[in-house]
Image (spheres, rainbow, N blue to C red):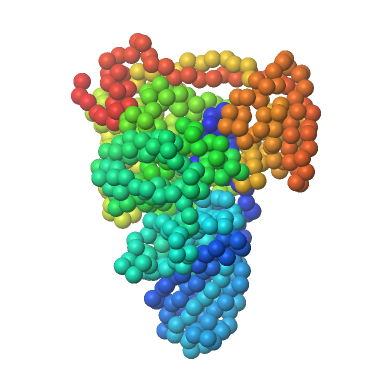
Amino acid sequence: MPRLAPIFLAIAIPGLAASQRGPSSCGVACAAASARSAAIGDVRYRLEFDAAHGVSRAVGVQMTFTVRSDDAVLLSLPAWTPGAYEISDYARNVSGFSAASSARALRWDKSDPDTWRIYPDGAREITVRFESRADSLDNAFNWAEDEFALVNGTNVFLYPEGQPFEFPATVTVRAEPTWRIVTGLTRAADGSYTAPTYHELVDAPFFIGRFDLDSALIAGKWMRLATYPAGSETGTRRAALWDALQKSVPPQAAVFGEVPWSAYTVMQIADSTFRGMSALEHQNSNVGVVGTPFLDESFVPSVYAHEIFHAYNVKRLRPADLWPYRYDARQPTPWLWMSEGITDYYADLVMVRGGAITPADFRGLTHGKIDHVAQLPPVALEDASLQTWLRMRDGTQDIYYDKGSLAGLALDILIRDASDNAASLDDVMRGLYRTAYQAGRGFTADEWWGAVSRAAGGVSFADFAARYVHGREPYPWDLWLPKAGWRLVTDTLIEARLGVVLAPDSTGLVVSAVDPRSVADVAGVRVGDVLEKVAGVPASDPAFFRKWSQQAGGAAGAPLDIEVRRSGKLITLHGELRFVTLIHARVEDDAAATSKAQRIRHGILTGTVSAP
Ligand SMILES: [Zn+2]
C-alpha cells in the first residue's frame, strides 16, 4: 500500500489517505458474470513513450497475440493495483482503441465497462492499440512529464478475461535513444523484457526517460536507485539514502534467511506539488513519490525499509484470500493489519537493528503509534483491514498500519516472554514464509495463529485474537511493555488543533473530513477544500503542524487565518485559536526491568534470541 508520511500520522492529523477516487464500477457481481475470452498465445506488448508522448502526457500501448478460433477475444484492464487497495478503473484512461490484423481493421465493442470484445473474423494474429493517459501523480498510475514517464503495468497491459494469468509475455519499449529504461522485469538479449506470468508482468513498473541511476551490492545482491528528476537526489542526500539502505536491508534478510531477488530497484519521483510521501511495493522494486520539501526527512528511508520488507511480507508471504490476486474487482482481506502493520513494525525494527536509527528513535516511533491509535475511535484490526477499500473518512482509514504494527510488537513481546526469549515473531514470519509462500500458496488464519502459538511454546493466542484483533479492546501496555524492559509514561499536553482529516494528492492537502465544532468547522472549512496556509505557515512546510500553532501564538480566542483553495479560488477564512487537552504516551526504558525483560528488549532491538 502507498505508505504515507509518518510525520503526518503521528502529529495532529490522523487518517491521511491516498487521494480519494470514485467507487468501483465493477463489483463482485460483475466478476461473477464475467465471460470467457477465446484463448490467446504468443503475447507481445509494446510501450511507446518519446518526446511527443511526453508533451501529450500519454503512453502508446500495443498488444499483439495469436488466436486459433473465431470466438470473441475479451481483453480487460485491471480495476486496481495490488498493494494500492482502492478501485482505480484504469480503463477510463484509455483513448483511441483499435484492433487490426495486418492492415485489416477488426470489429470490436465493450462487453463490460473495462473489457474490449474483439471479433477475429478469420484473423490469426491480432494487434490492438490505444493510448493511456499519464497525468496522475500516484504510484499506482501512469504519470509523465516532457522527458520522463512512470508506467504501471496494471494501467496498460490487457489480459484475456476468464483465462489463466499464467501466460508468458514480452515487452518492448520504444523511447528516445538517449533515454534510460528501468524496470524489475528480466531483460532479454534482444533488449525486450520478459515476464513468465501476468502477475509478474504487472508487478514491475517502468521508469522511462531522463533520471539518475546507480547501484550497489547489498546483502550480496544488486540494488539500484533510480531517481527523477535528475539532480533531485544527489551528493550527501543520495549518500544518506544509500547508507540507510545498506543498514536496513541485511536485517530483513536475517529475518527470512534469504534475499529473494536477483536485483531490487528503488524508484523515486520527487515533485514539489506532492505533500508527504507515498510508496508502493512490488516483488523486486518499489515506487516512491516524495514531496520535494520532504526529501531529507527521516521518514524517507523508513518508508523504503517498509516497502522492501513487503518484498517478503505480502508480495511473497501473503494471506490466502489475496492469493492469487484478482484484478477485476475489490479483493478484501481481514489481514492487512499483518501484511501492512507488521511490515511497519519490521520497518522500525530493521532500521534499529541495522543501526540506521537509535533505540530511543525506535521508542519514539512506537509511542507515536500508540498516540495515533489513542486519538481515534476504537476499530478492530480485522474491520479496519476489510474497510480500507472504502477510504473511511472518520480518521481510521490507515489505522491498521500503526495499530497492526503495535499488535506485532505485542506478539513479539508475548512470544519472547512465553519462550523465555528462545523464540520471537521472527520465527513466525520465517516459518510461514517457508511453509506457505515457498509451498506456492497463501497462509490461513489457522496457520498464522498456529505458528504464533508454537513459537510461544504452545501458549494459546485465541484470547489475544478475540480481544485485540477481532475485538476492539484497548491494548494493555502497562502489562505488556514491562515484559520487554519498557514502560509507558503519559503526559498531559494542551495543544492547538485544527480538527481536519487531510488527504494528500497532486492538488495539495485536501480536506476529507472536518470535526464538528472544531476550529476548522467554526471557521468554515469544508470537505474538498485544499489547505494552503494556517497563520501564514504554508501547508507544504515539512514542519507545518508544529509551526502553525507557534506562529498563531497567543491565547485561546486569538484570531487565526486559514487559507484554502476552493473550486480553484483562494479564500481566507477567519477562525479562532483553540486548544484541546491530549494525553501523549512516551515509551521509556524501565529502570526496574528484570534481567529477563532486559534480555527480551535486547533481543527485539538486535533481532536475536538468547538463553538465560
Ligand atoms: Zn505497505
542 in relation to 200, above or below:
above
Q: Nearer the viewer, residue 316 or 541?
A: 541
Left-right relation of 498 to 480: right
Q: Quadrant of residue 410?
A: top left
Residue 56, x across and y down, in percent = 61, 63
Residue at the spot 46% in from the left edge and 32% down from the top edge: 298
**Residue 570 placement (x, y as % from top left):** 77, 40
The residue sitting at 25% across, 45% down in the picture is 220
Number of numbered discs visible in the structure rendering: 0
Q: Quadrant of the C terminus?
A: top left
Q: Which of the two residues, 466 or 480, is positioned nearer the viewer here?
A: 480
Residue 186 appearing in the image: yes
Asked if 454 appears above or below 283 in the picture, the reply is: above
Q: Is residue 228 above or below residue 522?
A: below
**Farthest residue, direction bottom:** 122
| Furthest residue toward top | 592
Report whether 85 appears left or right of 608.
right
Between 366 and 434, the residue placed more toward the observer is: 366
Please give the name of the residue rendered at 45% of the width and 61% of the height, measured from the top-left corner: 178
Percent of width and height locating residue 32: 52, 65
Residue 526 on image: x %, y %? 74, 38
Residue at the extreme left of the image, as rendered:
611
- Residue appearing at x 49%, y 33% in the figure: 297
Ligand 1 is found in which quarter of the picture?
Answer: top left
